[in-house]
Amino acid sequence: MEILYWAIIIALFVIAFVGLVYPIIPSVLFLVGGFLLYGVFFSFEELTLLFWIITVLFVILLFVADYFANLLGVKKFGGSNASIWGSTIGLLIGPFVIPIAGIILGPFLGAVIGELLFNKNGLKASMKAGFGSVVGLFSSALVKGIIQGIMIIIFFIFV
């Protein structure tokens, strides 16, 4: 039974990393879900108050890193709040409209459309902001992947 429990916990960790590519998947919930299931399946004894404080701080860091990586990517390439919102909407809708390519095309097109509609920027400036949104998306995924990896390492140190 122990092997099954570990398989479920590790599956949740894997899904958390899949969420880096498919942002519709709430990565942090699967990660924390794995921690909680460990407690349910085995024991919460090893998961001390210090572990949970560290986990909460890293969860906050994940949200902050996600927001700022996207913001910096868009702003660095001349985008505005319209392109950030468009990128976010495109990120949520894109994978459903165009299953695999939508992960990249959704944020790009969302940022471009946001810039064209709300800021009345030219196509060149809007495309530059769209490129920035894709850079922000990849930067965010990289940073969140590192943070999630650290969280899992900390989990195994405590366990």
Image: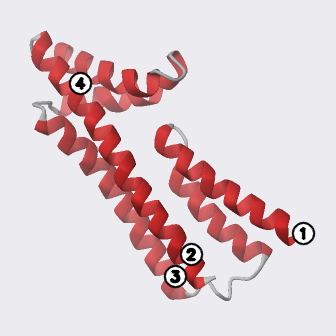
Instruction: Indicate the secondary structure of the residue bearing disc 2.
Output: helix
Give the numbered dot on residue 155.
2
Instruction: Indicate the secondary structure of the residue bearing disc 3.
Output: helix
Q: Position of residue 15 (x, y in %)?
A: 61, 49
The three-letter amino acid code for the residue at tag 4 is Gly
Q: Position of residue 118 (x, y in %)?
A: 17, 18
| Residue depicted at x 12% and y 38% | 76
Is tag 1's residue or tag 2's residue first in the polypeptide sequence?
A: 1
- The answer to whether marks 3 and 2 mark residues whose Cβ atoms lie closer than 8 Å is yes
Give the numbered dot on residue 130.
4
State the CA–CA distance, disc 1 to disc 2: 21 Å
Give the numbered dot on residue 1.
1
Residue beneath disc 3: 51
| Residue depicted at x 48% and y 63% | 149
Give the numbered dot on residue 76.
none
The three-letter amino acid code for the residue at tag 3 is Phe
